[in-house]
Amino acid sequence: MNEEKLIRYIQGEITSEKEVVKILDWIQSSPENQTSYSQLKNLWVASGFEHPEAVVVPAFPYPKIERNLFQTNIFRSILRYAAIFILAFTLGSVSIYLVNKGERDQLSTLYNTIEVPYGKRSQITLYDGTKVWLNSGTKFRYPVVFSRKSRDVYMEGEAYFDVAKDPNHPFTVSSGQLKINVLGTHFDVCAYPDDNEFSATLNEGSVNAVNTTTDKGLKLIPGEQLILNRKTNGMKLVKVDTDLYTSWKEGMLKFENAPFDELIKKMERWYDVDIKVEPSVSTKGHYTMTIKTESLREMLKVVSKTTAIKYEIIENNVKINRP
């Protein structure tokens, strides 16, 4: 497939039904083509845009099944950088009428993949009306068309979900050994592959969190957080101030009595830097603060007022020593 044509498709410039079907057929024809398409799309997103603009797309109903009718409408894809380093974009909103179940099932196995780099955030609206906020360093995968029975998405990193209610099509979020089952609710999932613990924090509604390794599940109510220890497979529920775990989608990081290593890890993702802490530095401190518009240097100055450190910033690398 010609790369120029794929780029025009990503930009939403191809509206011909015949051409769109050809491109979709090519993408789903092999894993190699799917990989090539995802890489090209991610490269185009990462290249940056000039006009800050947050966009969402209206919700549209599930594809109808009708005899002898196949029609595809592609809504124009728009990708823009938004204020406060939030990359907001909507990709591949599709309304599809299918000839038979087989064609629907084929498209439900074709996925869009979004990768948000460190130092950025993203917001998208899926074609069922579900809103998703993606935190720094998150990979999010969702089908071109949801299946007939469920709405299944996959992620690594952190995401906040405002799930559109649809009792006939349960919404499922899978991340490693953590699986969240919902019908319609607001919740956060934090599941970075390099973290020892995964968590799910519920703001509104109810969810059932399952450890797929042990097949054990726990039901959450608003104000609760589930913590899954990946080494022991242990699960526990704790009462939390949910704002501490969801404020990042508003462009803020809030810490309350957070340990030093948690502070450093989140700062690395937030600012897209690699922070090296020398063994001589005391890491026993706990921190209560809010990061919003502060620069990396400003945040390190705040830390240095409560912990005896000196720091050196060289491009995307930070070295922290004792003074």
Image: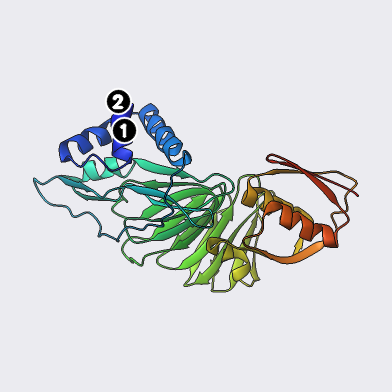
Color encoding of the figure: rainbow
Measuring from the top left, give residue 283's x and y in whole percent: 84, 54
The reply to whether residue 232 is in sight is no
Q: Is residue 262 left or right of residue 235?
A: right
Q: Quadrant of the N terminus?
A: top left
Measuring from the top left, give residue 234's x and y in whole percent: 67, 57
Q: What residue lies at 47% left-to-right and 67% top-to-bottom?
A: 186
Find residue 214 and name its label.
none
Disc 2: CA contacts within 10 A as few (<14), some (14-19) or many (>=20):
few
Q: Is residue 323 left or right of residue 232?
A: right
Residue at label 1? Answer: 6
Residue at label 2? Answer: 2
Q: Is residue 298 left or right of residue 169?
A: right
Marks 2 and 1, how far apart in space?
A: 7 Å
Q: What residue lies at 63% left-to-right and 72% top-to-bottom?
A: 241
Instruction: Report the front residue among 15 and 239.
Output: 15
Name which quarter of the figure residue 70 lies in.
top left
Question: Which amino acid is tagged 1?
Answer: Leu
